[in-house]
Image (cartoon, rainbow, N blue to C red):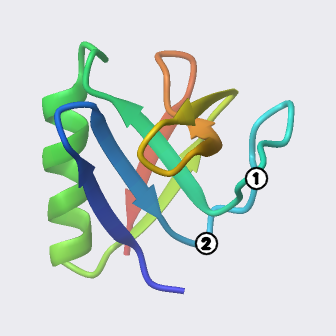
Amino acid sequence: MSTNIEIVRNEGLMIFGAFGNPGYTPCSSANGVWVAKTRSEYTEILSSALAAVAGQLKLRIYAHNGATVSWHGTDYNQLTSSGAMYISR
């Protein structure tokens, strides 16, 4: 499964990939991770994720929370300050 990034209006971004459902409490939708635009590192996460996808690098994301993404109408894992994103070859 390839990794895709969807910038959702002025709300944040979805990163779709083979992530499974890594949160403590499984969300309704697997293989997607939400990053809210209100997150303090939003710009850095967006830039890093776009660079990883453009460079065909692997992303691993650890998320501990879920959030409802209004654009999709369901809940996804959410990358918060308690999670992590790793980029590798």
Where is residue 28? Give x, y as percent.
Answer: 78, 49
Q: Which amino acid type is shown beneath numbered disc 1?
A: Asn
Q: Is residue 21 left or right of residue 58?
A: right
Secondary structure type for disc 2: loop
> Please, which residue is most extreme toward the bottom here?
1
* Residue at image location 64% in from the left, 45% down from the top: 74
* Quadrant of residue 15 within the rendered picture: bottom left
Mark 2 is surrounded, within 10 Å at the Cα level, by few (under 14), some (14 to 19) or many (20 or more) other residues, namely some
Which of the 4 quarters of the picture holds residue 85? top left
Look at the numbered disc 1 and give the secondary structure of its residue.
loop
Residue at 16%, 76% in the rendered image? 54
**For residue 84, above or below residue 19:** above
**Residue 33's x, y, as percent?**
52, 47
Taking the image as shown, residue 10 lies to the left or right of residue 80, namely left
The residue shown at (57%, 17%) is 82
Q: Position of residue 52 (x, y in %)?
A: 25, 65
Mark 2 vs 1: CB contact within 8 A: no
Neighbour class for label 1 at 10 Å: few (<14), some, many (≥20)?
many
Q: Quadrant of the N terminus?
A: bottom right
Labelled disc at residue 84: none
Instruction: Say what amino acid the circle numbered 2 marks.
Output: Ala
Is 4 situated left or right of 53 in this image? Answer: right
Task: Give the number of marks.
Answer: 2
Residue 22 vertical placement versus 59 (above, below) = above
The quadrant of the image that shows the C terminus is bottom left
Task: Quote the CA–CA distance across marks 2 and 1.
Answer: 9 Å
For mark 2, what is the residue? 18
When the figure is inspected, residue 54 is found, relative to residue 62, above or below; the finding is: below
At 76% from the left and 37% from the top, the residue drawn is 23
Q: Which mark is residue 21?
A: 1
